Image (cartoon, rainbow, N blue to C red):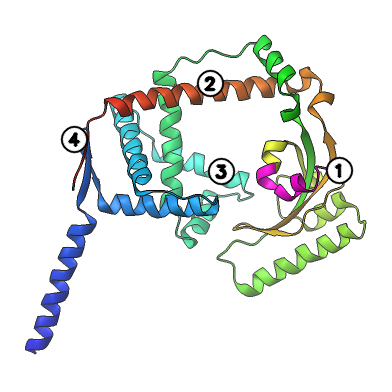
């Protein structure tokens, strides 16, 4: 009995010591604390993202990112900016629909199954805070038609586009092996028929799960090469040619493959067809650059004390 009590006491003390280490304050930013727990969470998230991109994140970079997040929240508080639950839910639903998921509840279920819901929601909330801050602290000049035309003339090669169609089978990570196997058979069937010369649009209407493109024969529209480099790097590697059919890909949403039916060079695109897109891109770049400069100034003014 004494041994049992002693063991329980050791466990209790160890738990207290562990909690002290986890909750230990490692930095103070304008009187707000950063704990070891927050640091560990941020470090794990950033290192996973860095590993996926073939990069390395140092401990100093993790702490700087935490300080940056805290300064952002402090500025939002200064301007009385609050992200309501309804606003966050609406934003999450928008992201869900972009991924072919029709309800916020289903999206949350999938993210929780991967144990990333809290991290994902925090990221969306941070973006919403930034959007509100944009309007409070920045006055961004709208790009003129002349600005857009000048960009068009000097960056035509970056305006190359590909007309992309895809077939998608919804198979989230939490799906059972047997159900996932059925989805794999369906995407394999679609791929076999397309590779044999079948009508892609007809096959997409029959076998694709994407509600946004299925009725259009899988038509995703014209995608810029920057997007293609992220979405289908093998298309870029193989010379960016029309008729390209990708291998079957798998991500956390399911299985898919694409076909590129046309490629148009920036030199062949009329300015009027891309003017709005260019102006939007120029505006976003100006806004982001100005916000980064503004936030850097707030970082420089912040009083940051690192604990040893």
Give the quarter of the image for residue 66.
Answer: top left
Does the rendering let one see residue 86?
A: no
> Which residue in the protein does label 1 denote?
242
Labels 2 and 3: the sequence-earlier one: 3
Q: Are marks 3 and 1 in contact (CB under 8 Å)?
A: no
Callout 3 secondary element: helix
Residue 265 point in image, percent of width and height: 82, 30
How far separated are the C-alphas under marks 3 and 1? 30 Å
Q: From where the camera sits, is residue 41 visible?
A: yes
Q: Is residue 186 above or below residue 242?
A: below
Q: Residues within 10 Å of mark 3 (few under 14, many from 20)?
A: some
In the rendered structure, which disc, 3 or 4, sits on the residue that comes first in sequence?
4
In the rendered view, tell whether residue 49 sits above or below residue 64: below
Q: Secondary structure at mark 1?
A: loop
- What residue is shown with label 3? 95
Tell which circle, 4 or 2, labels the residue nearer the N-terminal end. 4
State the SS at label 2.
helix
* Distance Cα–Cα, label 1 vs label 2: 34 Å
Image x and y of residue 20, in percent = 17, 58
Residue receiving disc 4: 31
> Does the magenta portion include 267?
no
Q: Nearer the viewer, residue 77 or 41?
A: 41
User: Which residue carries the number 2 mark?
Assistant: 286
Where is residue 49 shown, x and y percent of the image?
A: 49, 51
């Amino acid at each position: 009995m004494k041994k049992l009590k002693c063991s329980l006491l050791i466990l209790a003390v160890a738990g207290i010591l562990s909690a002290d280490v986890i909750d230990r304050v490692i930095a103070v930013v304008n009187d707000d604390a950063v704990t070891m727990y927050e640091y560990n969470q941020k470090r794990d998230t950033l290192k996973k993202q860095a590993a996926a991109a073939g990069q390395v994140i140092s401990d100093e970079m993790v702490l700087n990112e935490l300080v940056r997040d805290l300064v952002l929240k402090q500025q939002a508080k200064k301007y009385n900016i609050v992200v309501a639950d309804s606003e966050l839910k609406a934003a999450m639903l928008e992201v869900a629909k972009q991924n072919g998921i029709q309800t916020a509840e289903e999206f949350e279920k999938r993210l929780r199954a991967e144990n990333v819901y809290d991290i994902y929601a925090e990221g969306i909330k941070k973006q919403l805070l930034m959007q509100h801050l944009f309007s409070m602290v920045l006055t961004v000049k709208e790009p003129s038609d002349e600005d857009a035309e000048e960009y068009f003339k000097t960056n035509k090669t970056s305006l190359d586009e590909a007309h992309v169609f895809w077939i998608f089978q919804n198979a989230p990570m939490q799906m059972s092996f047997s159900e996932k196997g059925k989805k794999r058979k369906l995407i394999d069937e679609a791929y076999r028929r397309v590779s044999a010369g079948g009508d892609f649009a007809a096959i997409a209407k029959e076998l694709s799960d994407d509600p946004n493109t299925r009725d259009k024969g899988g038509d995703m529209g014209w995608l810029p090469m920057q997007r293609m480099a992220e979405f289908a790097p093998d298309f870029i590697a193989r010379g960016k040619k029309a008729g390209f059919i990708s291998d079957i890909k798998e991500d956390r949403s399911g299985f898919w493959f694409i076909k590129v039916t046309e490629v148009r060079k920036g030199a062949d695109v009329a300015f009027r067809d891309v003017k709005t897109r260019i102006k939007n891109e120029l505006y976003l770049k100006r806004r982001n650059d100005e916000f980064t400069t503004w936030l850097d100034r707030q970082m420089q003014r912040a009083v940051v004390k690192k604990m040893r």
